[in-house]
Amino acid sequence: MKVLRLPKSPKVLLGLGILGFFILMTIIGPWLAPYNPSATNFAANLTPSAHHWLGTTSLGQDIYSQLLVGARATMVVALLAGLVATILSVTIGVAAGYLGGLSDDGLSLLSNVFLAIPGLPLLIVIDSYLPVNSRSNTFVIGLIISLTGWAWGARVLRAQTMSLRNRDFVEAARIIGEKRHRIMFSEIAPNLLPVLASSFLFTVLYAIGAYVTLAYIGLTSTAVWNWGTMLYWAQANNAPLSNEWYWFVPPGICIALVGTGLALVNFGIDEFINPRLRAGGLTSRQRRKLGLPRRVRLGLTPVLRPAKAPRVSTAPAKLVSQ
Amino acid sequence: MSADTFDIQAVSPMKEGPAERKGNAVANVERSEFVLEVNNFSVDYGVGENMVRAVNDVTLHLRRSKVLGVAGESGSGKSTLVYAMTRLLRAPGVISGGSVTLNFTSRDDEKEFTTLNLVTASEKELRKIRWSHVSIVLQSALSALNPVLRVGREFDEVLKTHRPDMSKAQRRARAVELLTMVGLNDDRLARYPHELSGGQRQRIMIALALALDPDLVIMDEPTTALDVVTQREIISELHDLRSRFGFALIFITHDLSLLVELADEIVVMYAGEIVERAGASELYEAPRHPYTLGLLNSFPPLHGPRRELSGIPGSPPDLSDLPAGCNFYPRCPFAMSRCENEAPALTAIENSDRSVACWLHSSDSSVPVPVELSRTVNPARNPVTTLKERP
Amino acid sequence: MSEAVLSPAQLSARHLTRHFTTRVPGRFLTAKRVVRAVDDVSLDLFEGRVTAVVGESGSGKSVLARMLARIVTPTSGELVLEGSPIPVRSKRTLDYAAKVQLVLQDPYASINPVHRIRHSLERPLLIHGANKGEVETLAKAALSRVSLDPPERFVDRYPHELSGGQLQRVSIARALCVKPDVLLADEPISMLDVSVRLGILNLLRGLCDDERLAILYITHDIASARYIADETIVMYAGQIVERSRGTALVDEPTHPYTQLLISSVPDPSDPTSQDPQKREHATFEVANVGCRFAPRCPFAMDVCRTDDPPDFIVGEDHTSHCWLHASEPEAAVEVAPPKRRREGEPTKA
């Protein structure tokens, strides 16, 4: 891959910062939590205080602990679902795009069916068939969410593959005798990394939403703490009506922040794919200092004042042998 | 080889130029000899740390109705030069110095010459001279012509914008006239660009460029994408058009043998600088710069015995990592130790109208000039007169 | 007049034809139009010889190369590899890939940009049976063979770090890794800088002489063909219109198209270059009946508009697809047996 320069865009840095923060929370959250989130031995409905930073629930549980511990399940399921869905979409999308013909027809039919079926109802149906004990298994939940989230990525990747299929380097691989599956996954797929990354981020976003929704409706086991379950309990105990904002607002904000982080990083990937979107390496402050207009208009090449001397290499030049 | 084809620009103290050419105060009448004067022009990509200088301190002057050929390969800066000259260069290109002066007659008064520095001109002033005094023909007509407009509509738009007083019928008549001029049938007006061949599209680009009878036409590799037979037709067309309309022409290409036939004067560019400037036949028969020699030897001949040629070793220069001395030093078969650390300036050659940027030809050089770079032009034999001298 | 056959051809093409059917929108229905991209082309590639095919875009030269590489299936005709005929409908085997390789025009596009150069060289080696252990050495040897020295400097680079000329050498090195007998090169220098082109041509010539490869060099630039060719073929609109040993047809072109081509090339040393007619050539217009070049030919006769000419012998190992030479004494020789190098077969009506 091309050397990945650290992105200078403030949008991307902010996004990465937010995501980094939550990944940190996922890893060390349960250790940081002051109390057991399920312990009900505290006074109920306490407002935020020094002992309970976010107060307590109607059952006397510490909300802050719930938030910290809940981060893990939420993020793990979202990331897992994103990963599995992306793997599925690469396999199916690239194969459909490269193979063409009947294989393409079949695989496209498959992805179209999954696209057409509304995700959430399908999830609910599949979930309701799960045996109760596996509803607490985050991996299983992650897997079934990924089942409903791969189809869109597959379509995008299929289109990209079809445009790459006729490129010279693919033809060259065929000419030297490379096998089909190696061409698809070793030659074409790495060229799709930016699109893949973007697709992955979108899918994670979708997965968080799906998981939280499932938990909110009560379809996941309440034994596993996650932000959606917090909202479930908050709703069940009329927290919004009784103005106990400290119960449902924090998990809501966390979900929103993760989503924002993902979207911001996605902007960065767009700029990476399309160099013209980049700021041209200059911040607006630098531009003003040099007397350049804020936006460069077509047909009006900017003029620098005063002229700068060219930079000259100090390395000794070597004669090319004849 | 005549002296009236181009201007002598004494850049270094090694040669004294005629006294009246020095100094800035040039009378209006004398100035009008030149349609374009580019002085110390520099163009960068990017600013600051990652800045790359694509054109470095280029000076050239073009007389009316003459043809200037700009030859070079990738990294030479030839395309950047002309796009920046006309302020058409896209971001992150930036003009970092110099001036580009266009001398033209305004339409109302033929005798009155106006001078405009394109570098400092405002958008309004640029719009006034664009297309009516300076026009440009690009390499790929397919990307320059609007694919959803019929060809006739393109002509209509151009004429409507710049000559609002023409009626629709007059515009159509002018479009037909222009097409006939470039050898196309007027039924081409009803076509879309993709329905035409590459050669036809390029002729349309030329017709559009001449629609307002400009003083200067710039062509950036207009025939590179065309087959050699179509290229020959179009070049021949150009000669006729030039003799009819008298516009000056800047022709950019990597095909030096084409320029020798077409141009009056040729500048050879390397790594953003002019390395040699001479009359076309002079350059071909008696090159002075090692790069020019190498370039001329890179074209296998169509006639004569088959010998092994070698081109130029190495690769085109990396503009972000140029050597400290002469840019061509790493690839030069005649390099001296001086060349490694000192960059030669473009200097006029004694008793001639040519310039070269090479230490081999400096008056204080201790090394004799190699035989290949000191040929003389045989005045009795001047084979390159065919197309240019044709009535 | 014929030379003794030196050795059997490495690769022969016999009457290769490729038609494309396109749909042309009409008023009510779409009409079918047949584009004859390559029409009845036969040629032989011998070891240690460079065969140059010269033609403009649309002449069918690239389709011909792809048919010889077997990545495009001919509509009819046959291929003979080292004496054994290849059934045209069969799949391309690894064995064929090991013997016949193709180098493409655009060096920037023909090497995968996300992998290092090492990967692009290792793949053909591994596919064709090299051990993992020797792969590194063989890859470096291939780079040295194409004068990318020292190979260590290039093996770990990414394609965007190399220049066009260097990339094209990598492309050739990749083809050489397979150890082919036949190397097909489709316009290998047209996208390169002028000063770099000769280096690649010299490399191809060197490979031909040293490694006894059979090389097919496709180009639109007749001067470069003249530089390295042992046999020159000129194509127009899918057909071979003139062919000669060495570069005889450049010095004495006998077909009007070849003459037009040569006179159109900018040649400052030749003061006698012709001034072409000014009228717009309907370059799309290729005749479907009779000689394809007739609409553009300044010497077209009545017979040219009705009958496609056969190949006439106009010199030693020099044939021309033109009715102008019908009065030559040795005109219209009978079909020669496939293994002889002589041409002169009249096309069957």
Image: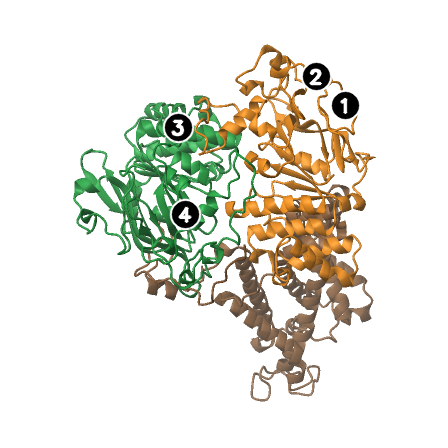
Q: Which chain carries label 4?
A: B
Q: Please identify, in this view, whether the residue under mark 2 or under mark 4 is nearer the observer.
A: 4
Query: In the image, residue C261 lies at what x, y percent?
Result: 54, 28
Q: Are marks 3 and 4 on the same chain?
A: yes
Q: Relative to B314, does residue A9 appear above or below in the rendering?
A: below
Chain B takes which shade in the image? green
Report the residue marked by disc 2.
C332
Residue A114 visible in rendering = no
Between marks 3 and 2, how big is the CA–CA gap? Answer: 40 Å
Report the residue marked by disc 4.
B373
Chain A takes which shade in the image? brown
Report the residue marked by disc 1.
C336
Q: Is mark 4 on a helix, strand or loop?
A: helix
Q: Are marks 1 and 2 on the same chain?
A: yes
Between marks 1 and 3, how big is the CA–CA gap? Answer: 46 Å
Give the letter of the orange chain. C
Report the residue marked by disc 3.
B386
Q: How crowded is mark 4: few (under 14 residues within 10 Å), some or many (20 or more)?
A: some
Asked whether disc 1 touches disc 3, contact meaning CB atoms under 8 Å apart, the reply is: no
Q: Which chain carries label 2?
A: C
Mark 4: amino acid: Leu
Q: How crowded is mark 3: few (under 14 residues within 10 Å), some or many (20 or more)?
A: some
Q: What element carries label 2?
A: loop
Between marks 1 and 2, how big is the CA–CA gap? Answer: 11 Å
